[in-house]
Image (cartoon, rainbow, N blue to C red):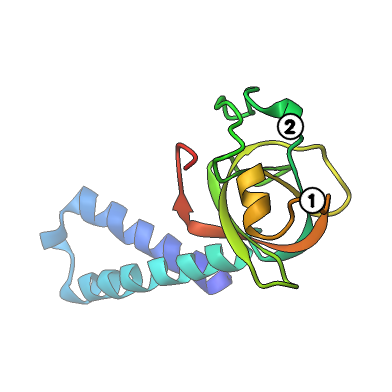
């Protein structure tokens, strides 16, 4: 962590010097150092961000929306449609695509978080009817699942 901090400070210092004095005024050794440090920093920062991310697979429980919520507005502003692959979660950012896996049957579904559910002391996700049917939850009330946010996927409108 300290090495990364000092690398960033060194890059910023060299960049400020080069913009103030002009890149042509710097000795050739300083420019090679700048290129070396700037090449290392993004990789180290990416690793740090990935390691510190709270988006990890967690075991939790899943249930599904009751029929009475059909057509009501969700927290994101969209109306709840039981045929879309959507879900409610207490803390994941709205628009995050999440893989929900039934560990017993190995069935999985990708849903978009577009609503909030009540805060619980355990991980919990509320699925749409279509998503609940796809992983074998429909008619069971609640099952244990694995919730995995997919960082590279982020949708604005639920599918």
* Vertical position of residue 69 compared to residue 52: above or below: above
User: Where residue 14 sits: x, y (%)?
Assistant: 31, 61
Query: Which residue is located at x 30 percent, y 52 percent?
Result: 16
- Would you place residue 113 above or below residue 5 in this image? above
Q: Quadrant of residue 52?
A: bottom right
Q: Label 2: how many residues lie within 10 Å, few (<14), some (14-19) or many (20+)? A: few
Task: Please tell me which residue lies in front, 14 or 63.
Answer: 63
Residue 100 vs residue 95, the one in the foreground: 100
Classify mark 1: helix, strand or loop: loop
Taking 19 as reference, is 14 above or below it?
Answer: below
Q: Give the residue displayed 45% in from the left and 38% down from the top.
A: 156
Label 1 belongs to which residue? 139
Task: Determine which residue is flagged by label 2.
Answer: 67
**Residue at the image position 89 percent from the left and 50 percent from the top:** 121
| Any part of residue 79 in sight | yes
SS at mark 2 in the image: helix
Look at 66% across and 72% down and name the residue there: 106
Inter-mark Cα distance, 1 to 2: 13 Å
Is residue 155 left or right of 65 when viewed as pictured?
left
Q: Residue furthest left?
A: 24
Q: Position of residue 147 (x, y in %)?
A: 68, 60
């Amino acid at each position: 962590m300290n090495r990364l901090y000092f690398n960033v400070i060194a890059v910023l210092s060299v960049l400020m010097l080069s913009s103030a004095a002009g890149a042509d005024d710097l000795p050739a050794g300083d420019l090679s150092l700048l290129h070396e440090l700037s090449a290392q920093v993004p990789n180290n920062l990416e690793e740090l961000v990935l390691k510190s991310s709270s988006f990890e697979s967690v075991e939790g429980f899943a249930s599904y929306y009751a029929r009475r919520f059909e057509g009501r507005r969700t927290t994101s502003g969209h109306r709840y449609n039981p045929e879309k692959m959507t879900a409610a979660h207490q803390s994941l950012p709205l628009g995050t695509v999440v893989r929900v896996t039934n560990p017993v049957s190995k069935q999985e579904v990708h849903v978009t978080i577009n609503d909030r559910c009540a805060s619980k002391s355990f991980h919990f996700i509320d699925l749409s009817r279509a998503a609940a049917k796809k992983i074998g939850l429909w008619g069971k009330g609640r099952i244990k699942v694995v919730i995995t946010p997919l960082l590279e996927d982020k949708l604005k409108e639920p599918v």
